[in-house]
Image (cartoon, rainbow, N blue to C red):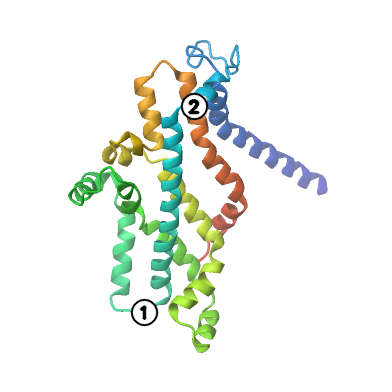
Amino acid sequence: MRLKEQFVKIVLYAVGLLIACIALFPLLWMAIAGFKGKTEVLATPFKFLPERWLFENYISILQDQMFIRSMLITFGGALLFAVLSLAINSSAAYVFARLEFRFKRVLWVYVILTMFVPGMAILLTSFIVVTKLGMLDTMAVLVLPGVASAGHMFFIRQFYLNIPMALEEAALIDGAGRFKIFSHIFLPMSYPVFVIVGIGSFLGYWNSFVWPTMTITNVNLFQIMQYLATFRSERATELGLLMAGSTLAAVPTVVLFLIFQKYIIRGIKISGLK
C-alpha cells in the first residue's frame, strides 16, 4: 500500500514539474533572448541559447531613461491603484455583507450585473466621459476609472459573510461603532483575501495597454506596456533589446508572486467558501 502511495506521489510530482516547465518556458526563453543579437531572436533554425551572450542588451535598456521612468511611473500607479482598490472594494463589501438598508438587494444585483459587461463594450463611452472631465494625460485617468470592481467586491463580501456574527455582536455590546468594527475586526482578518485582490489589482494595472494607449499621449506618463509597444514599432530590428526590456518589465510581477505565493494559495482556498 505504501509503495502504491509513493508511486502516485512521484507521478503527481512529475506531472506538476512538467506543467511548471511548460508554463515557465516562454518566460525563460524571453530572458535568454535578451542576451541574443538582433538577428538571432527569430533566426531559423530555432536556437534556444545564443551563440554569444550579449550582456549589453540589459545594460543598454537599464541606461534608457524613458524605460526607467516608465517602470517607476507604472509601479507607483499600480501601487496606488491596488491600495485604493482595497479601500473602496472592502468598504463596499462590508456594507453589503453586514448592513441592512433599503434597496440593498436591488443595488447588489446592479453591482453584480456590471461583472457581465465586457470592458471593451464600454471603452468608447468611458473615453468620452474622461475626456469631458478633462482627465486625459493625467495619472487620475489611469487610476480612478477602474478602482471600483464588482468582482473584487463579490470576492471580499463572500469572505466577510464567513466571519462569525458573534464577534461583531460582542463589539457592538462593548460600544464599538461600525467603522471601528470594520477597522479593528474585519480588516485584520482580511489579510489573505486582501493579498489576492491587491495582487489582482496590481497586475491588472501593470499589464494594461489599451486604456493607457487611448488616454495617455504625454511620453513622460507612458506606462511600461506603452513604452514596449512604442519601442517595438520604432526599433523593430532590435529584438534582443526588446526581449531584455520585456524581461525586466516582468520582474516585479514575478517577485510579487514569489513573496505572496503562500497567501495566494490560501486565498484560492477561501474562494471556495460560502
* Residue type highlighted by circle 1: Glu
Q: Is residue 160 left or right of residue 112?
A: right
Residue 271 seen: no
Query: Camera-side residue: 90 or 223?
Result: 223
Pointer 2 residue: 63
Q: Nearer the viewer, mark 2 or mark 1?
A: 2
Query: Camera-side residue: 164 or 129?
Result: 129
Residue at 76% from the left image edge and 41% from the top image edge:
7
188 w.r.t. 142: above or below: below
Residue at 38% from the left image edge and 71% from the top image edge:
96
Sequence-wise, which precedes: disc 2 or disc 1? 2
* Residue type highlighted by circle 2: Gln
183 w.r.t. 203: above or below: below
User: Where's residue 173, x and y in %?
Assistant: 51, 89
Residue at 43% from the left image edge and 65% from the top image edge:
90
Quadrant position of residue 157: bottom left
Pointer 1 residue: 100
User: Where's residue 240, x and y in %?
Assistant: 49, 19
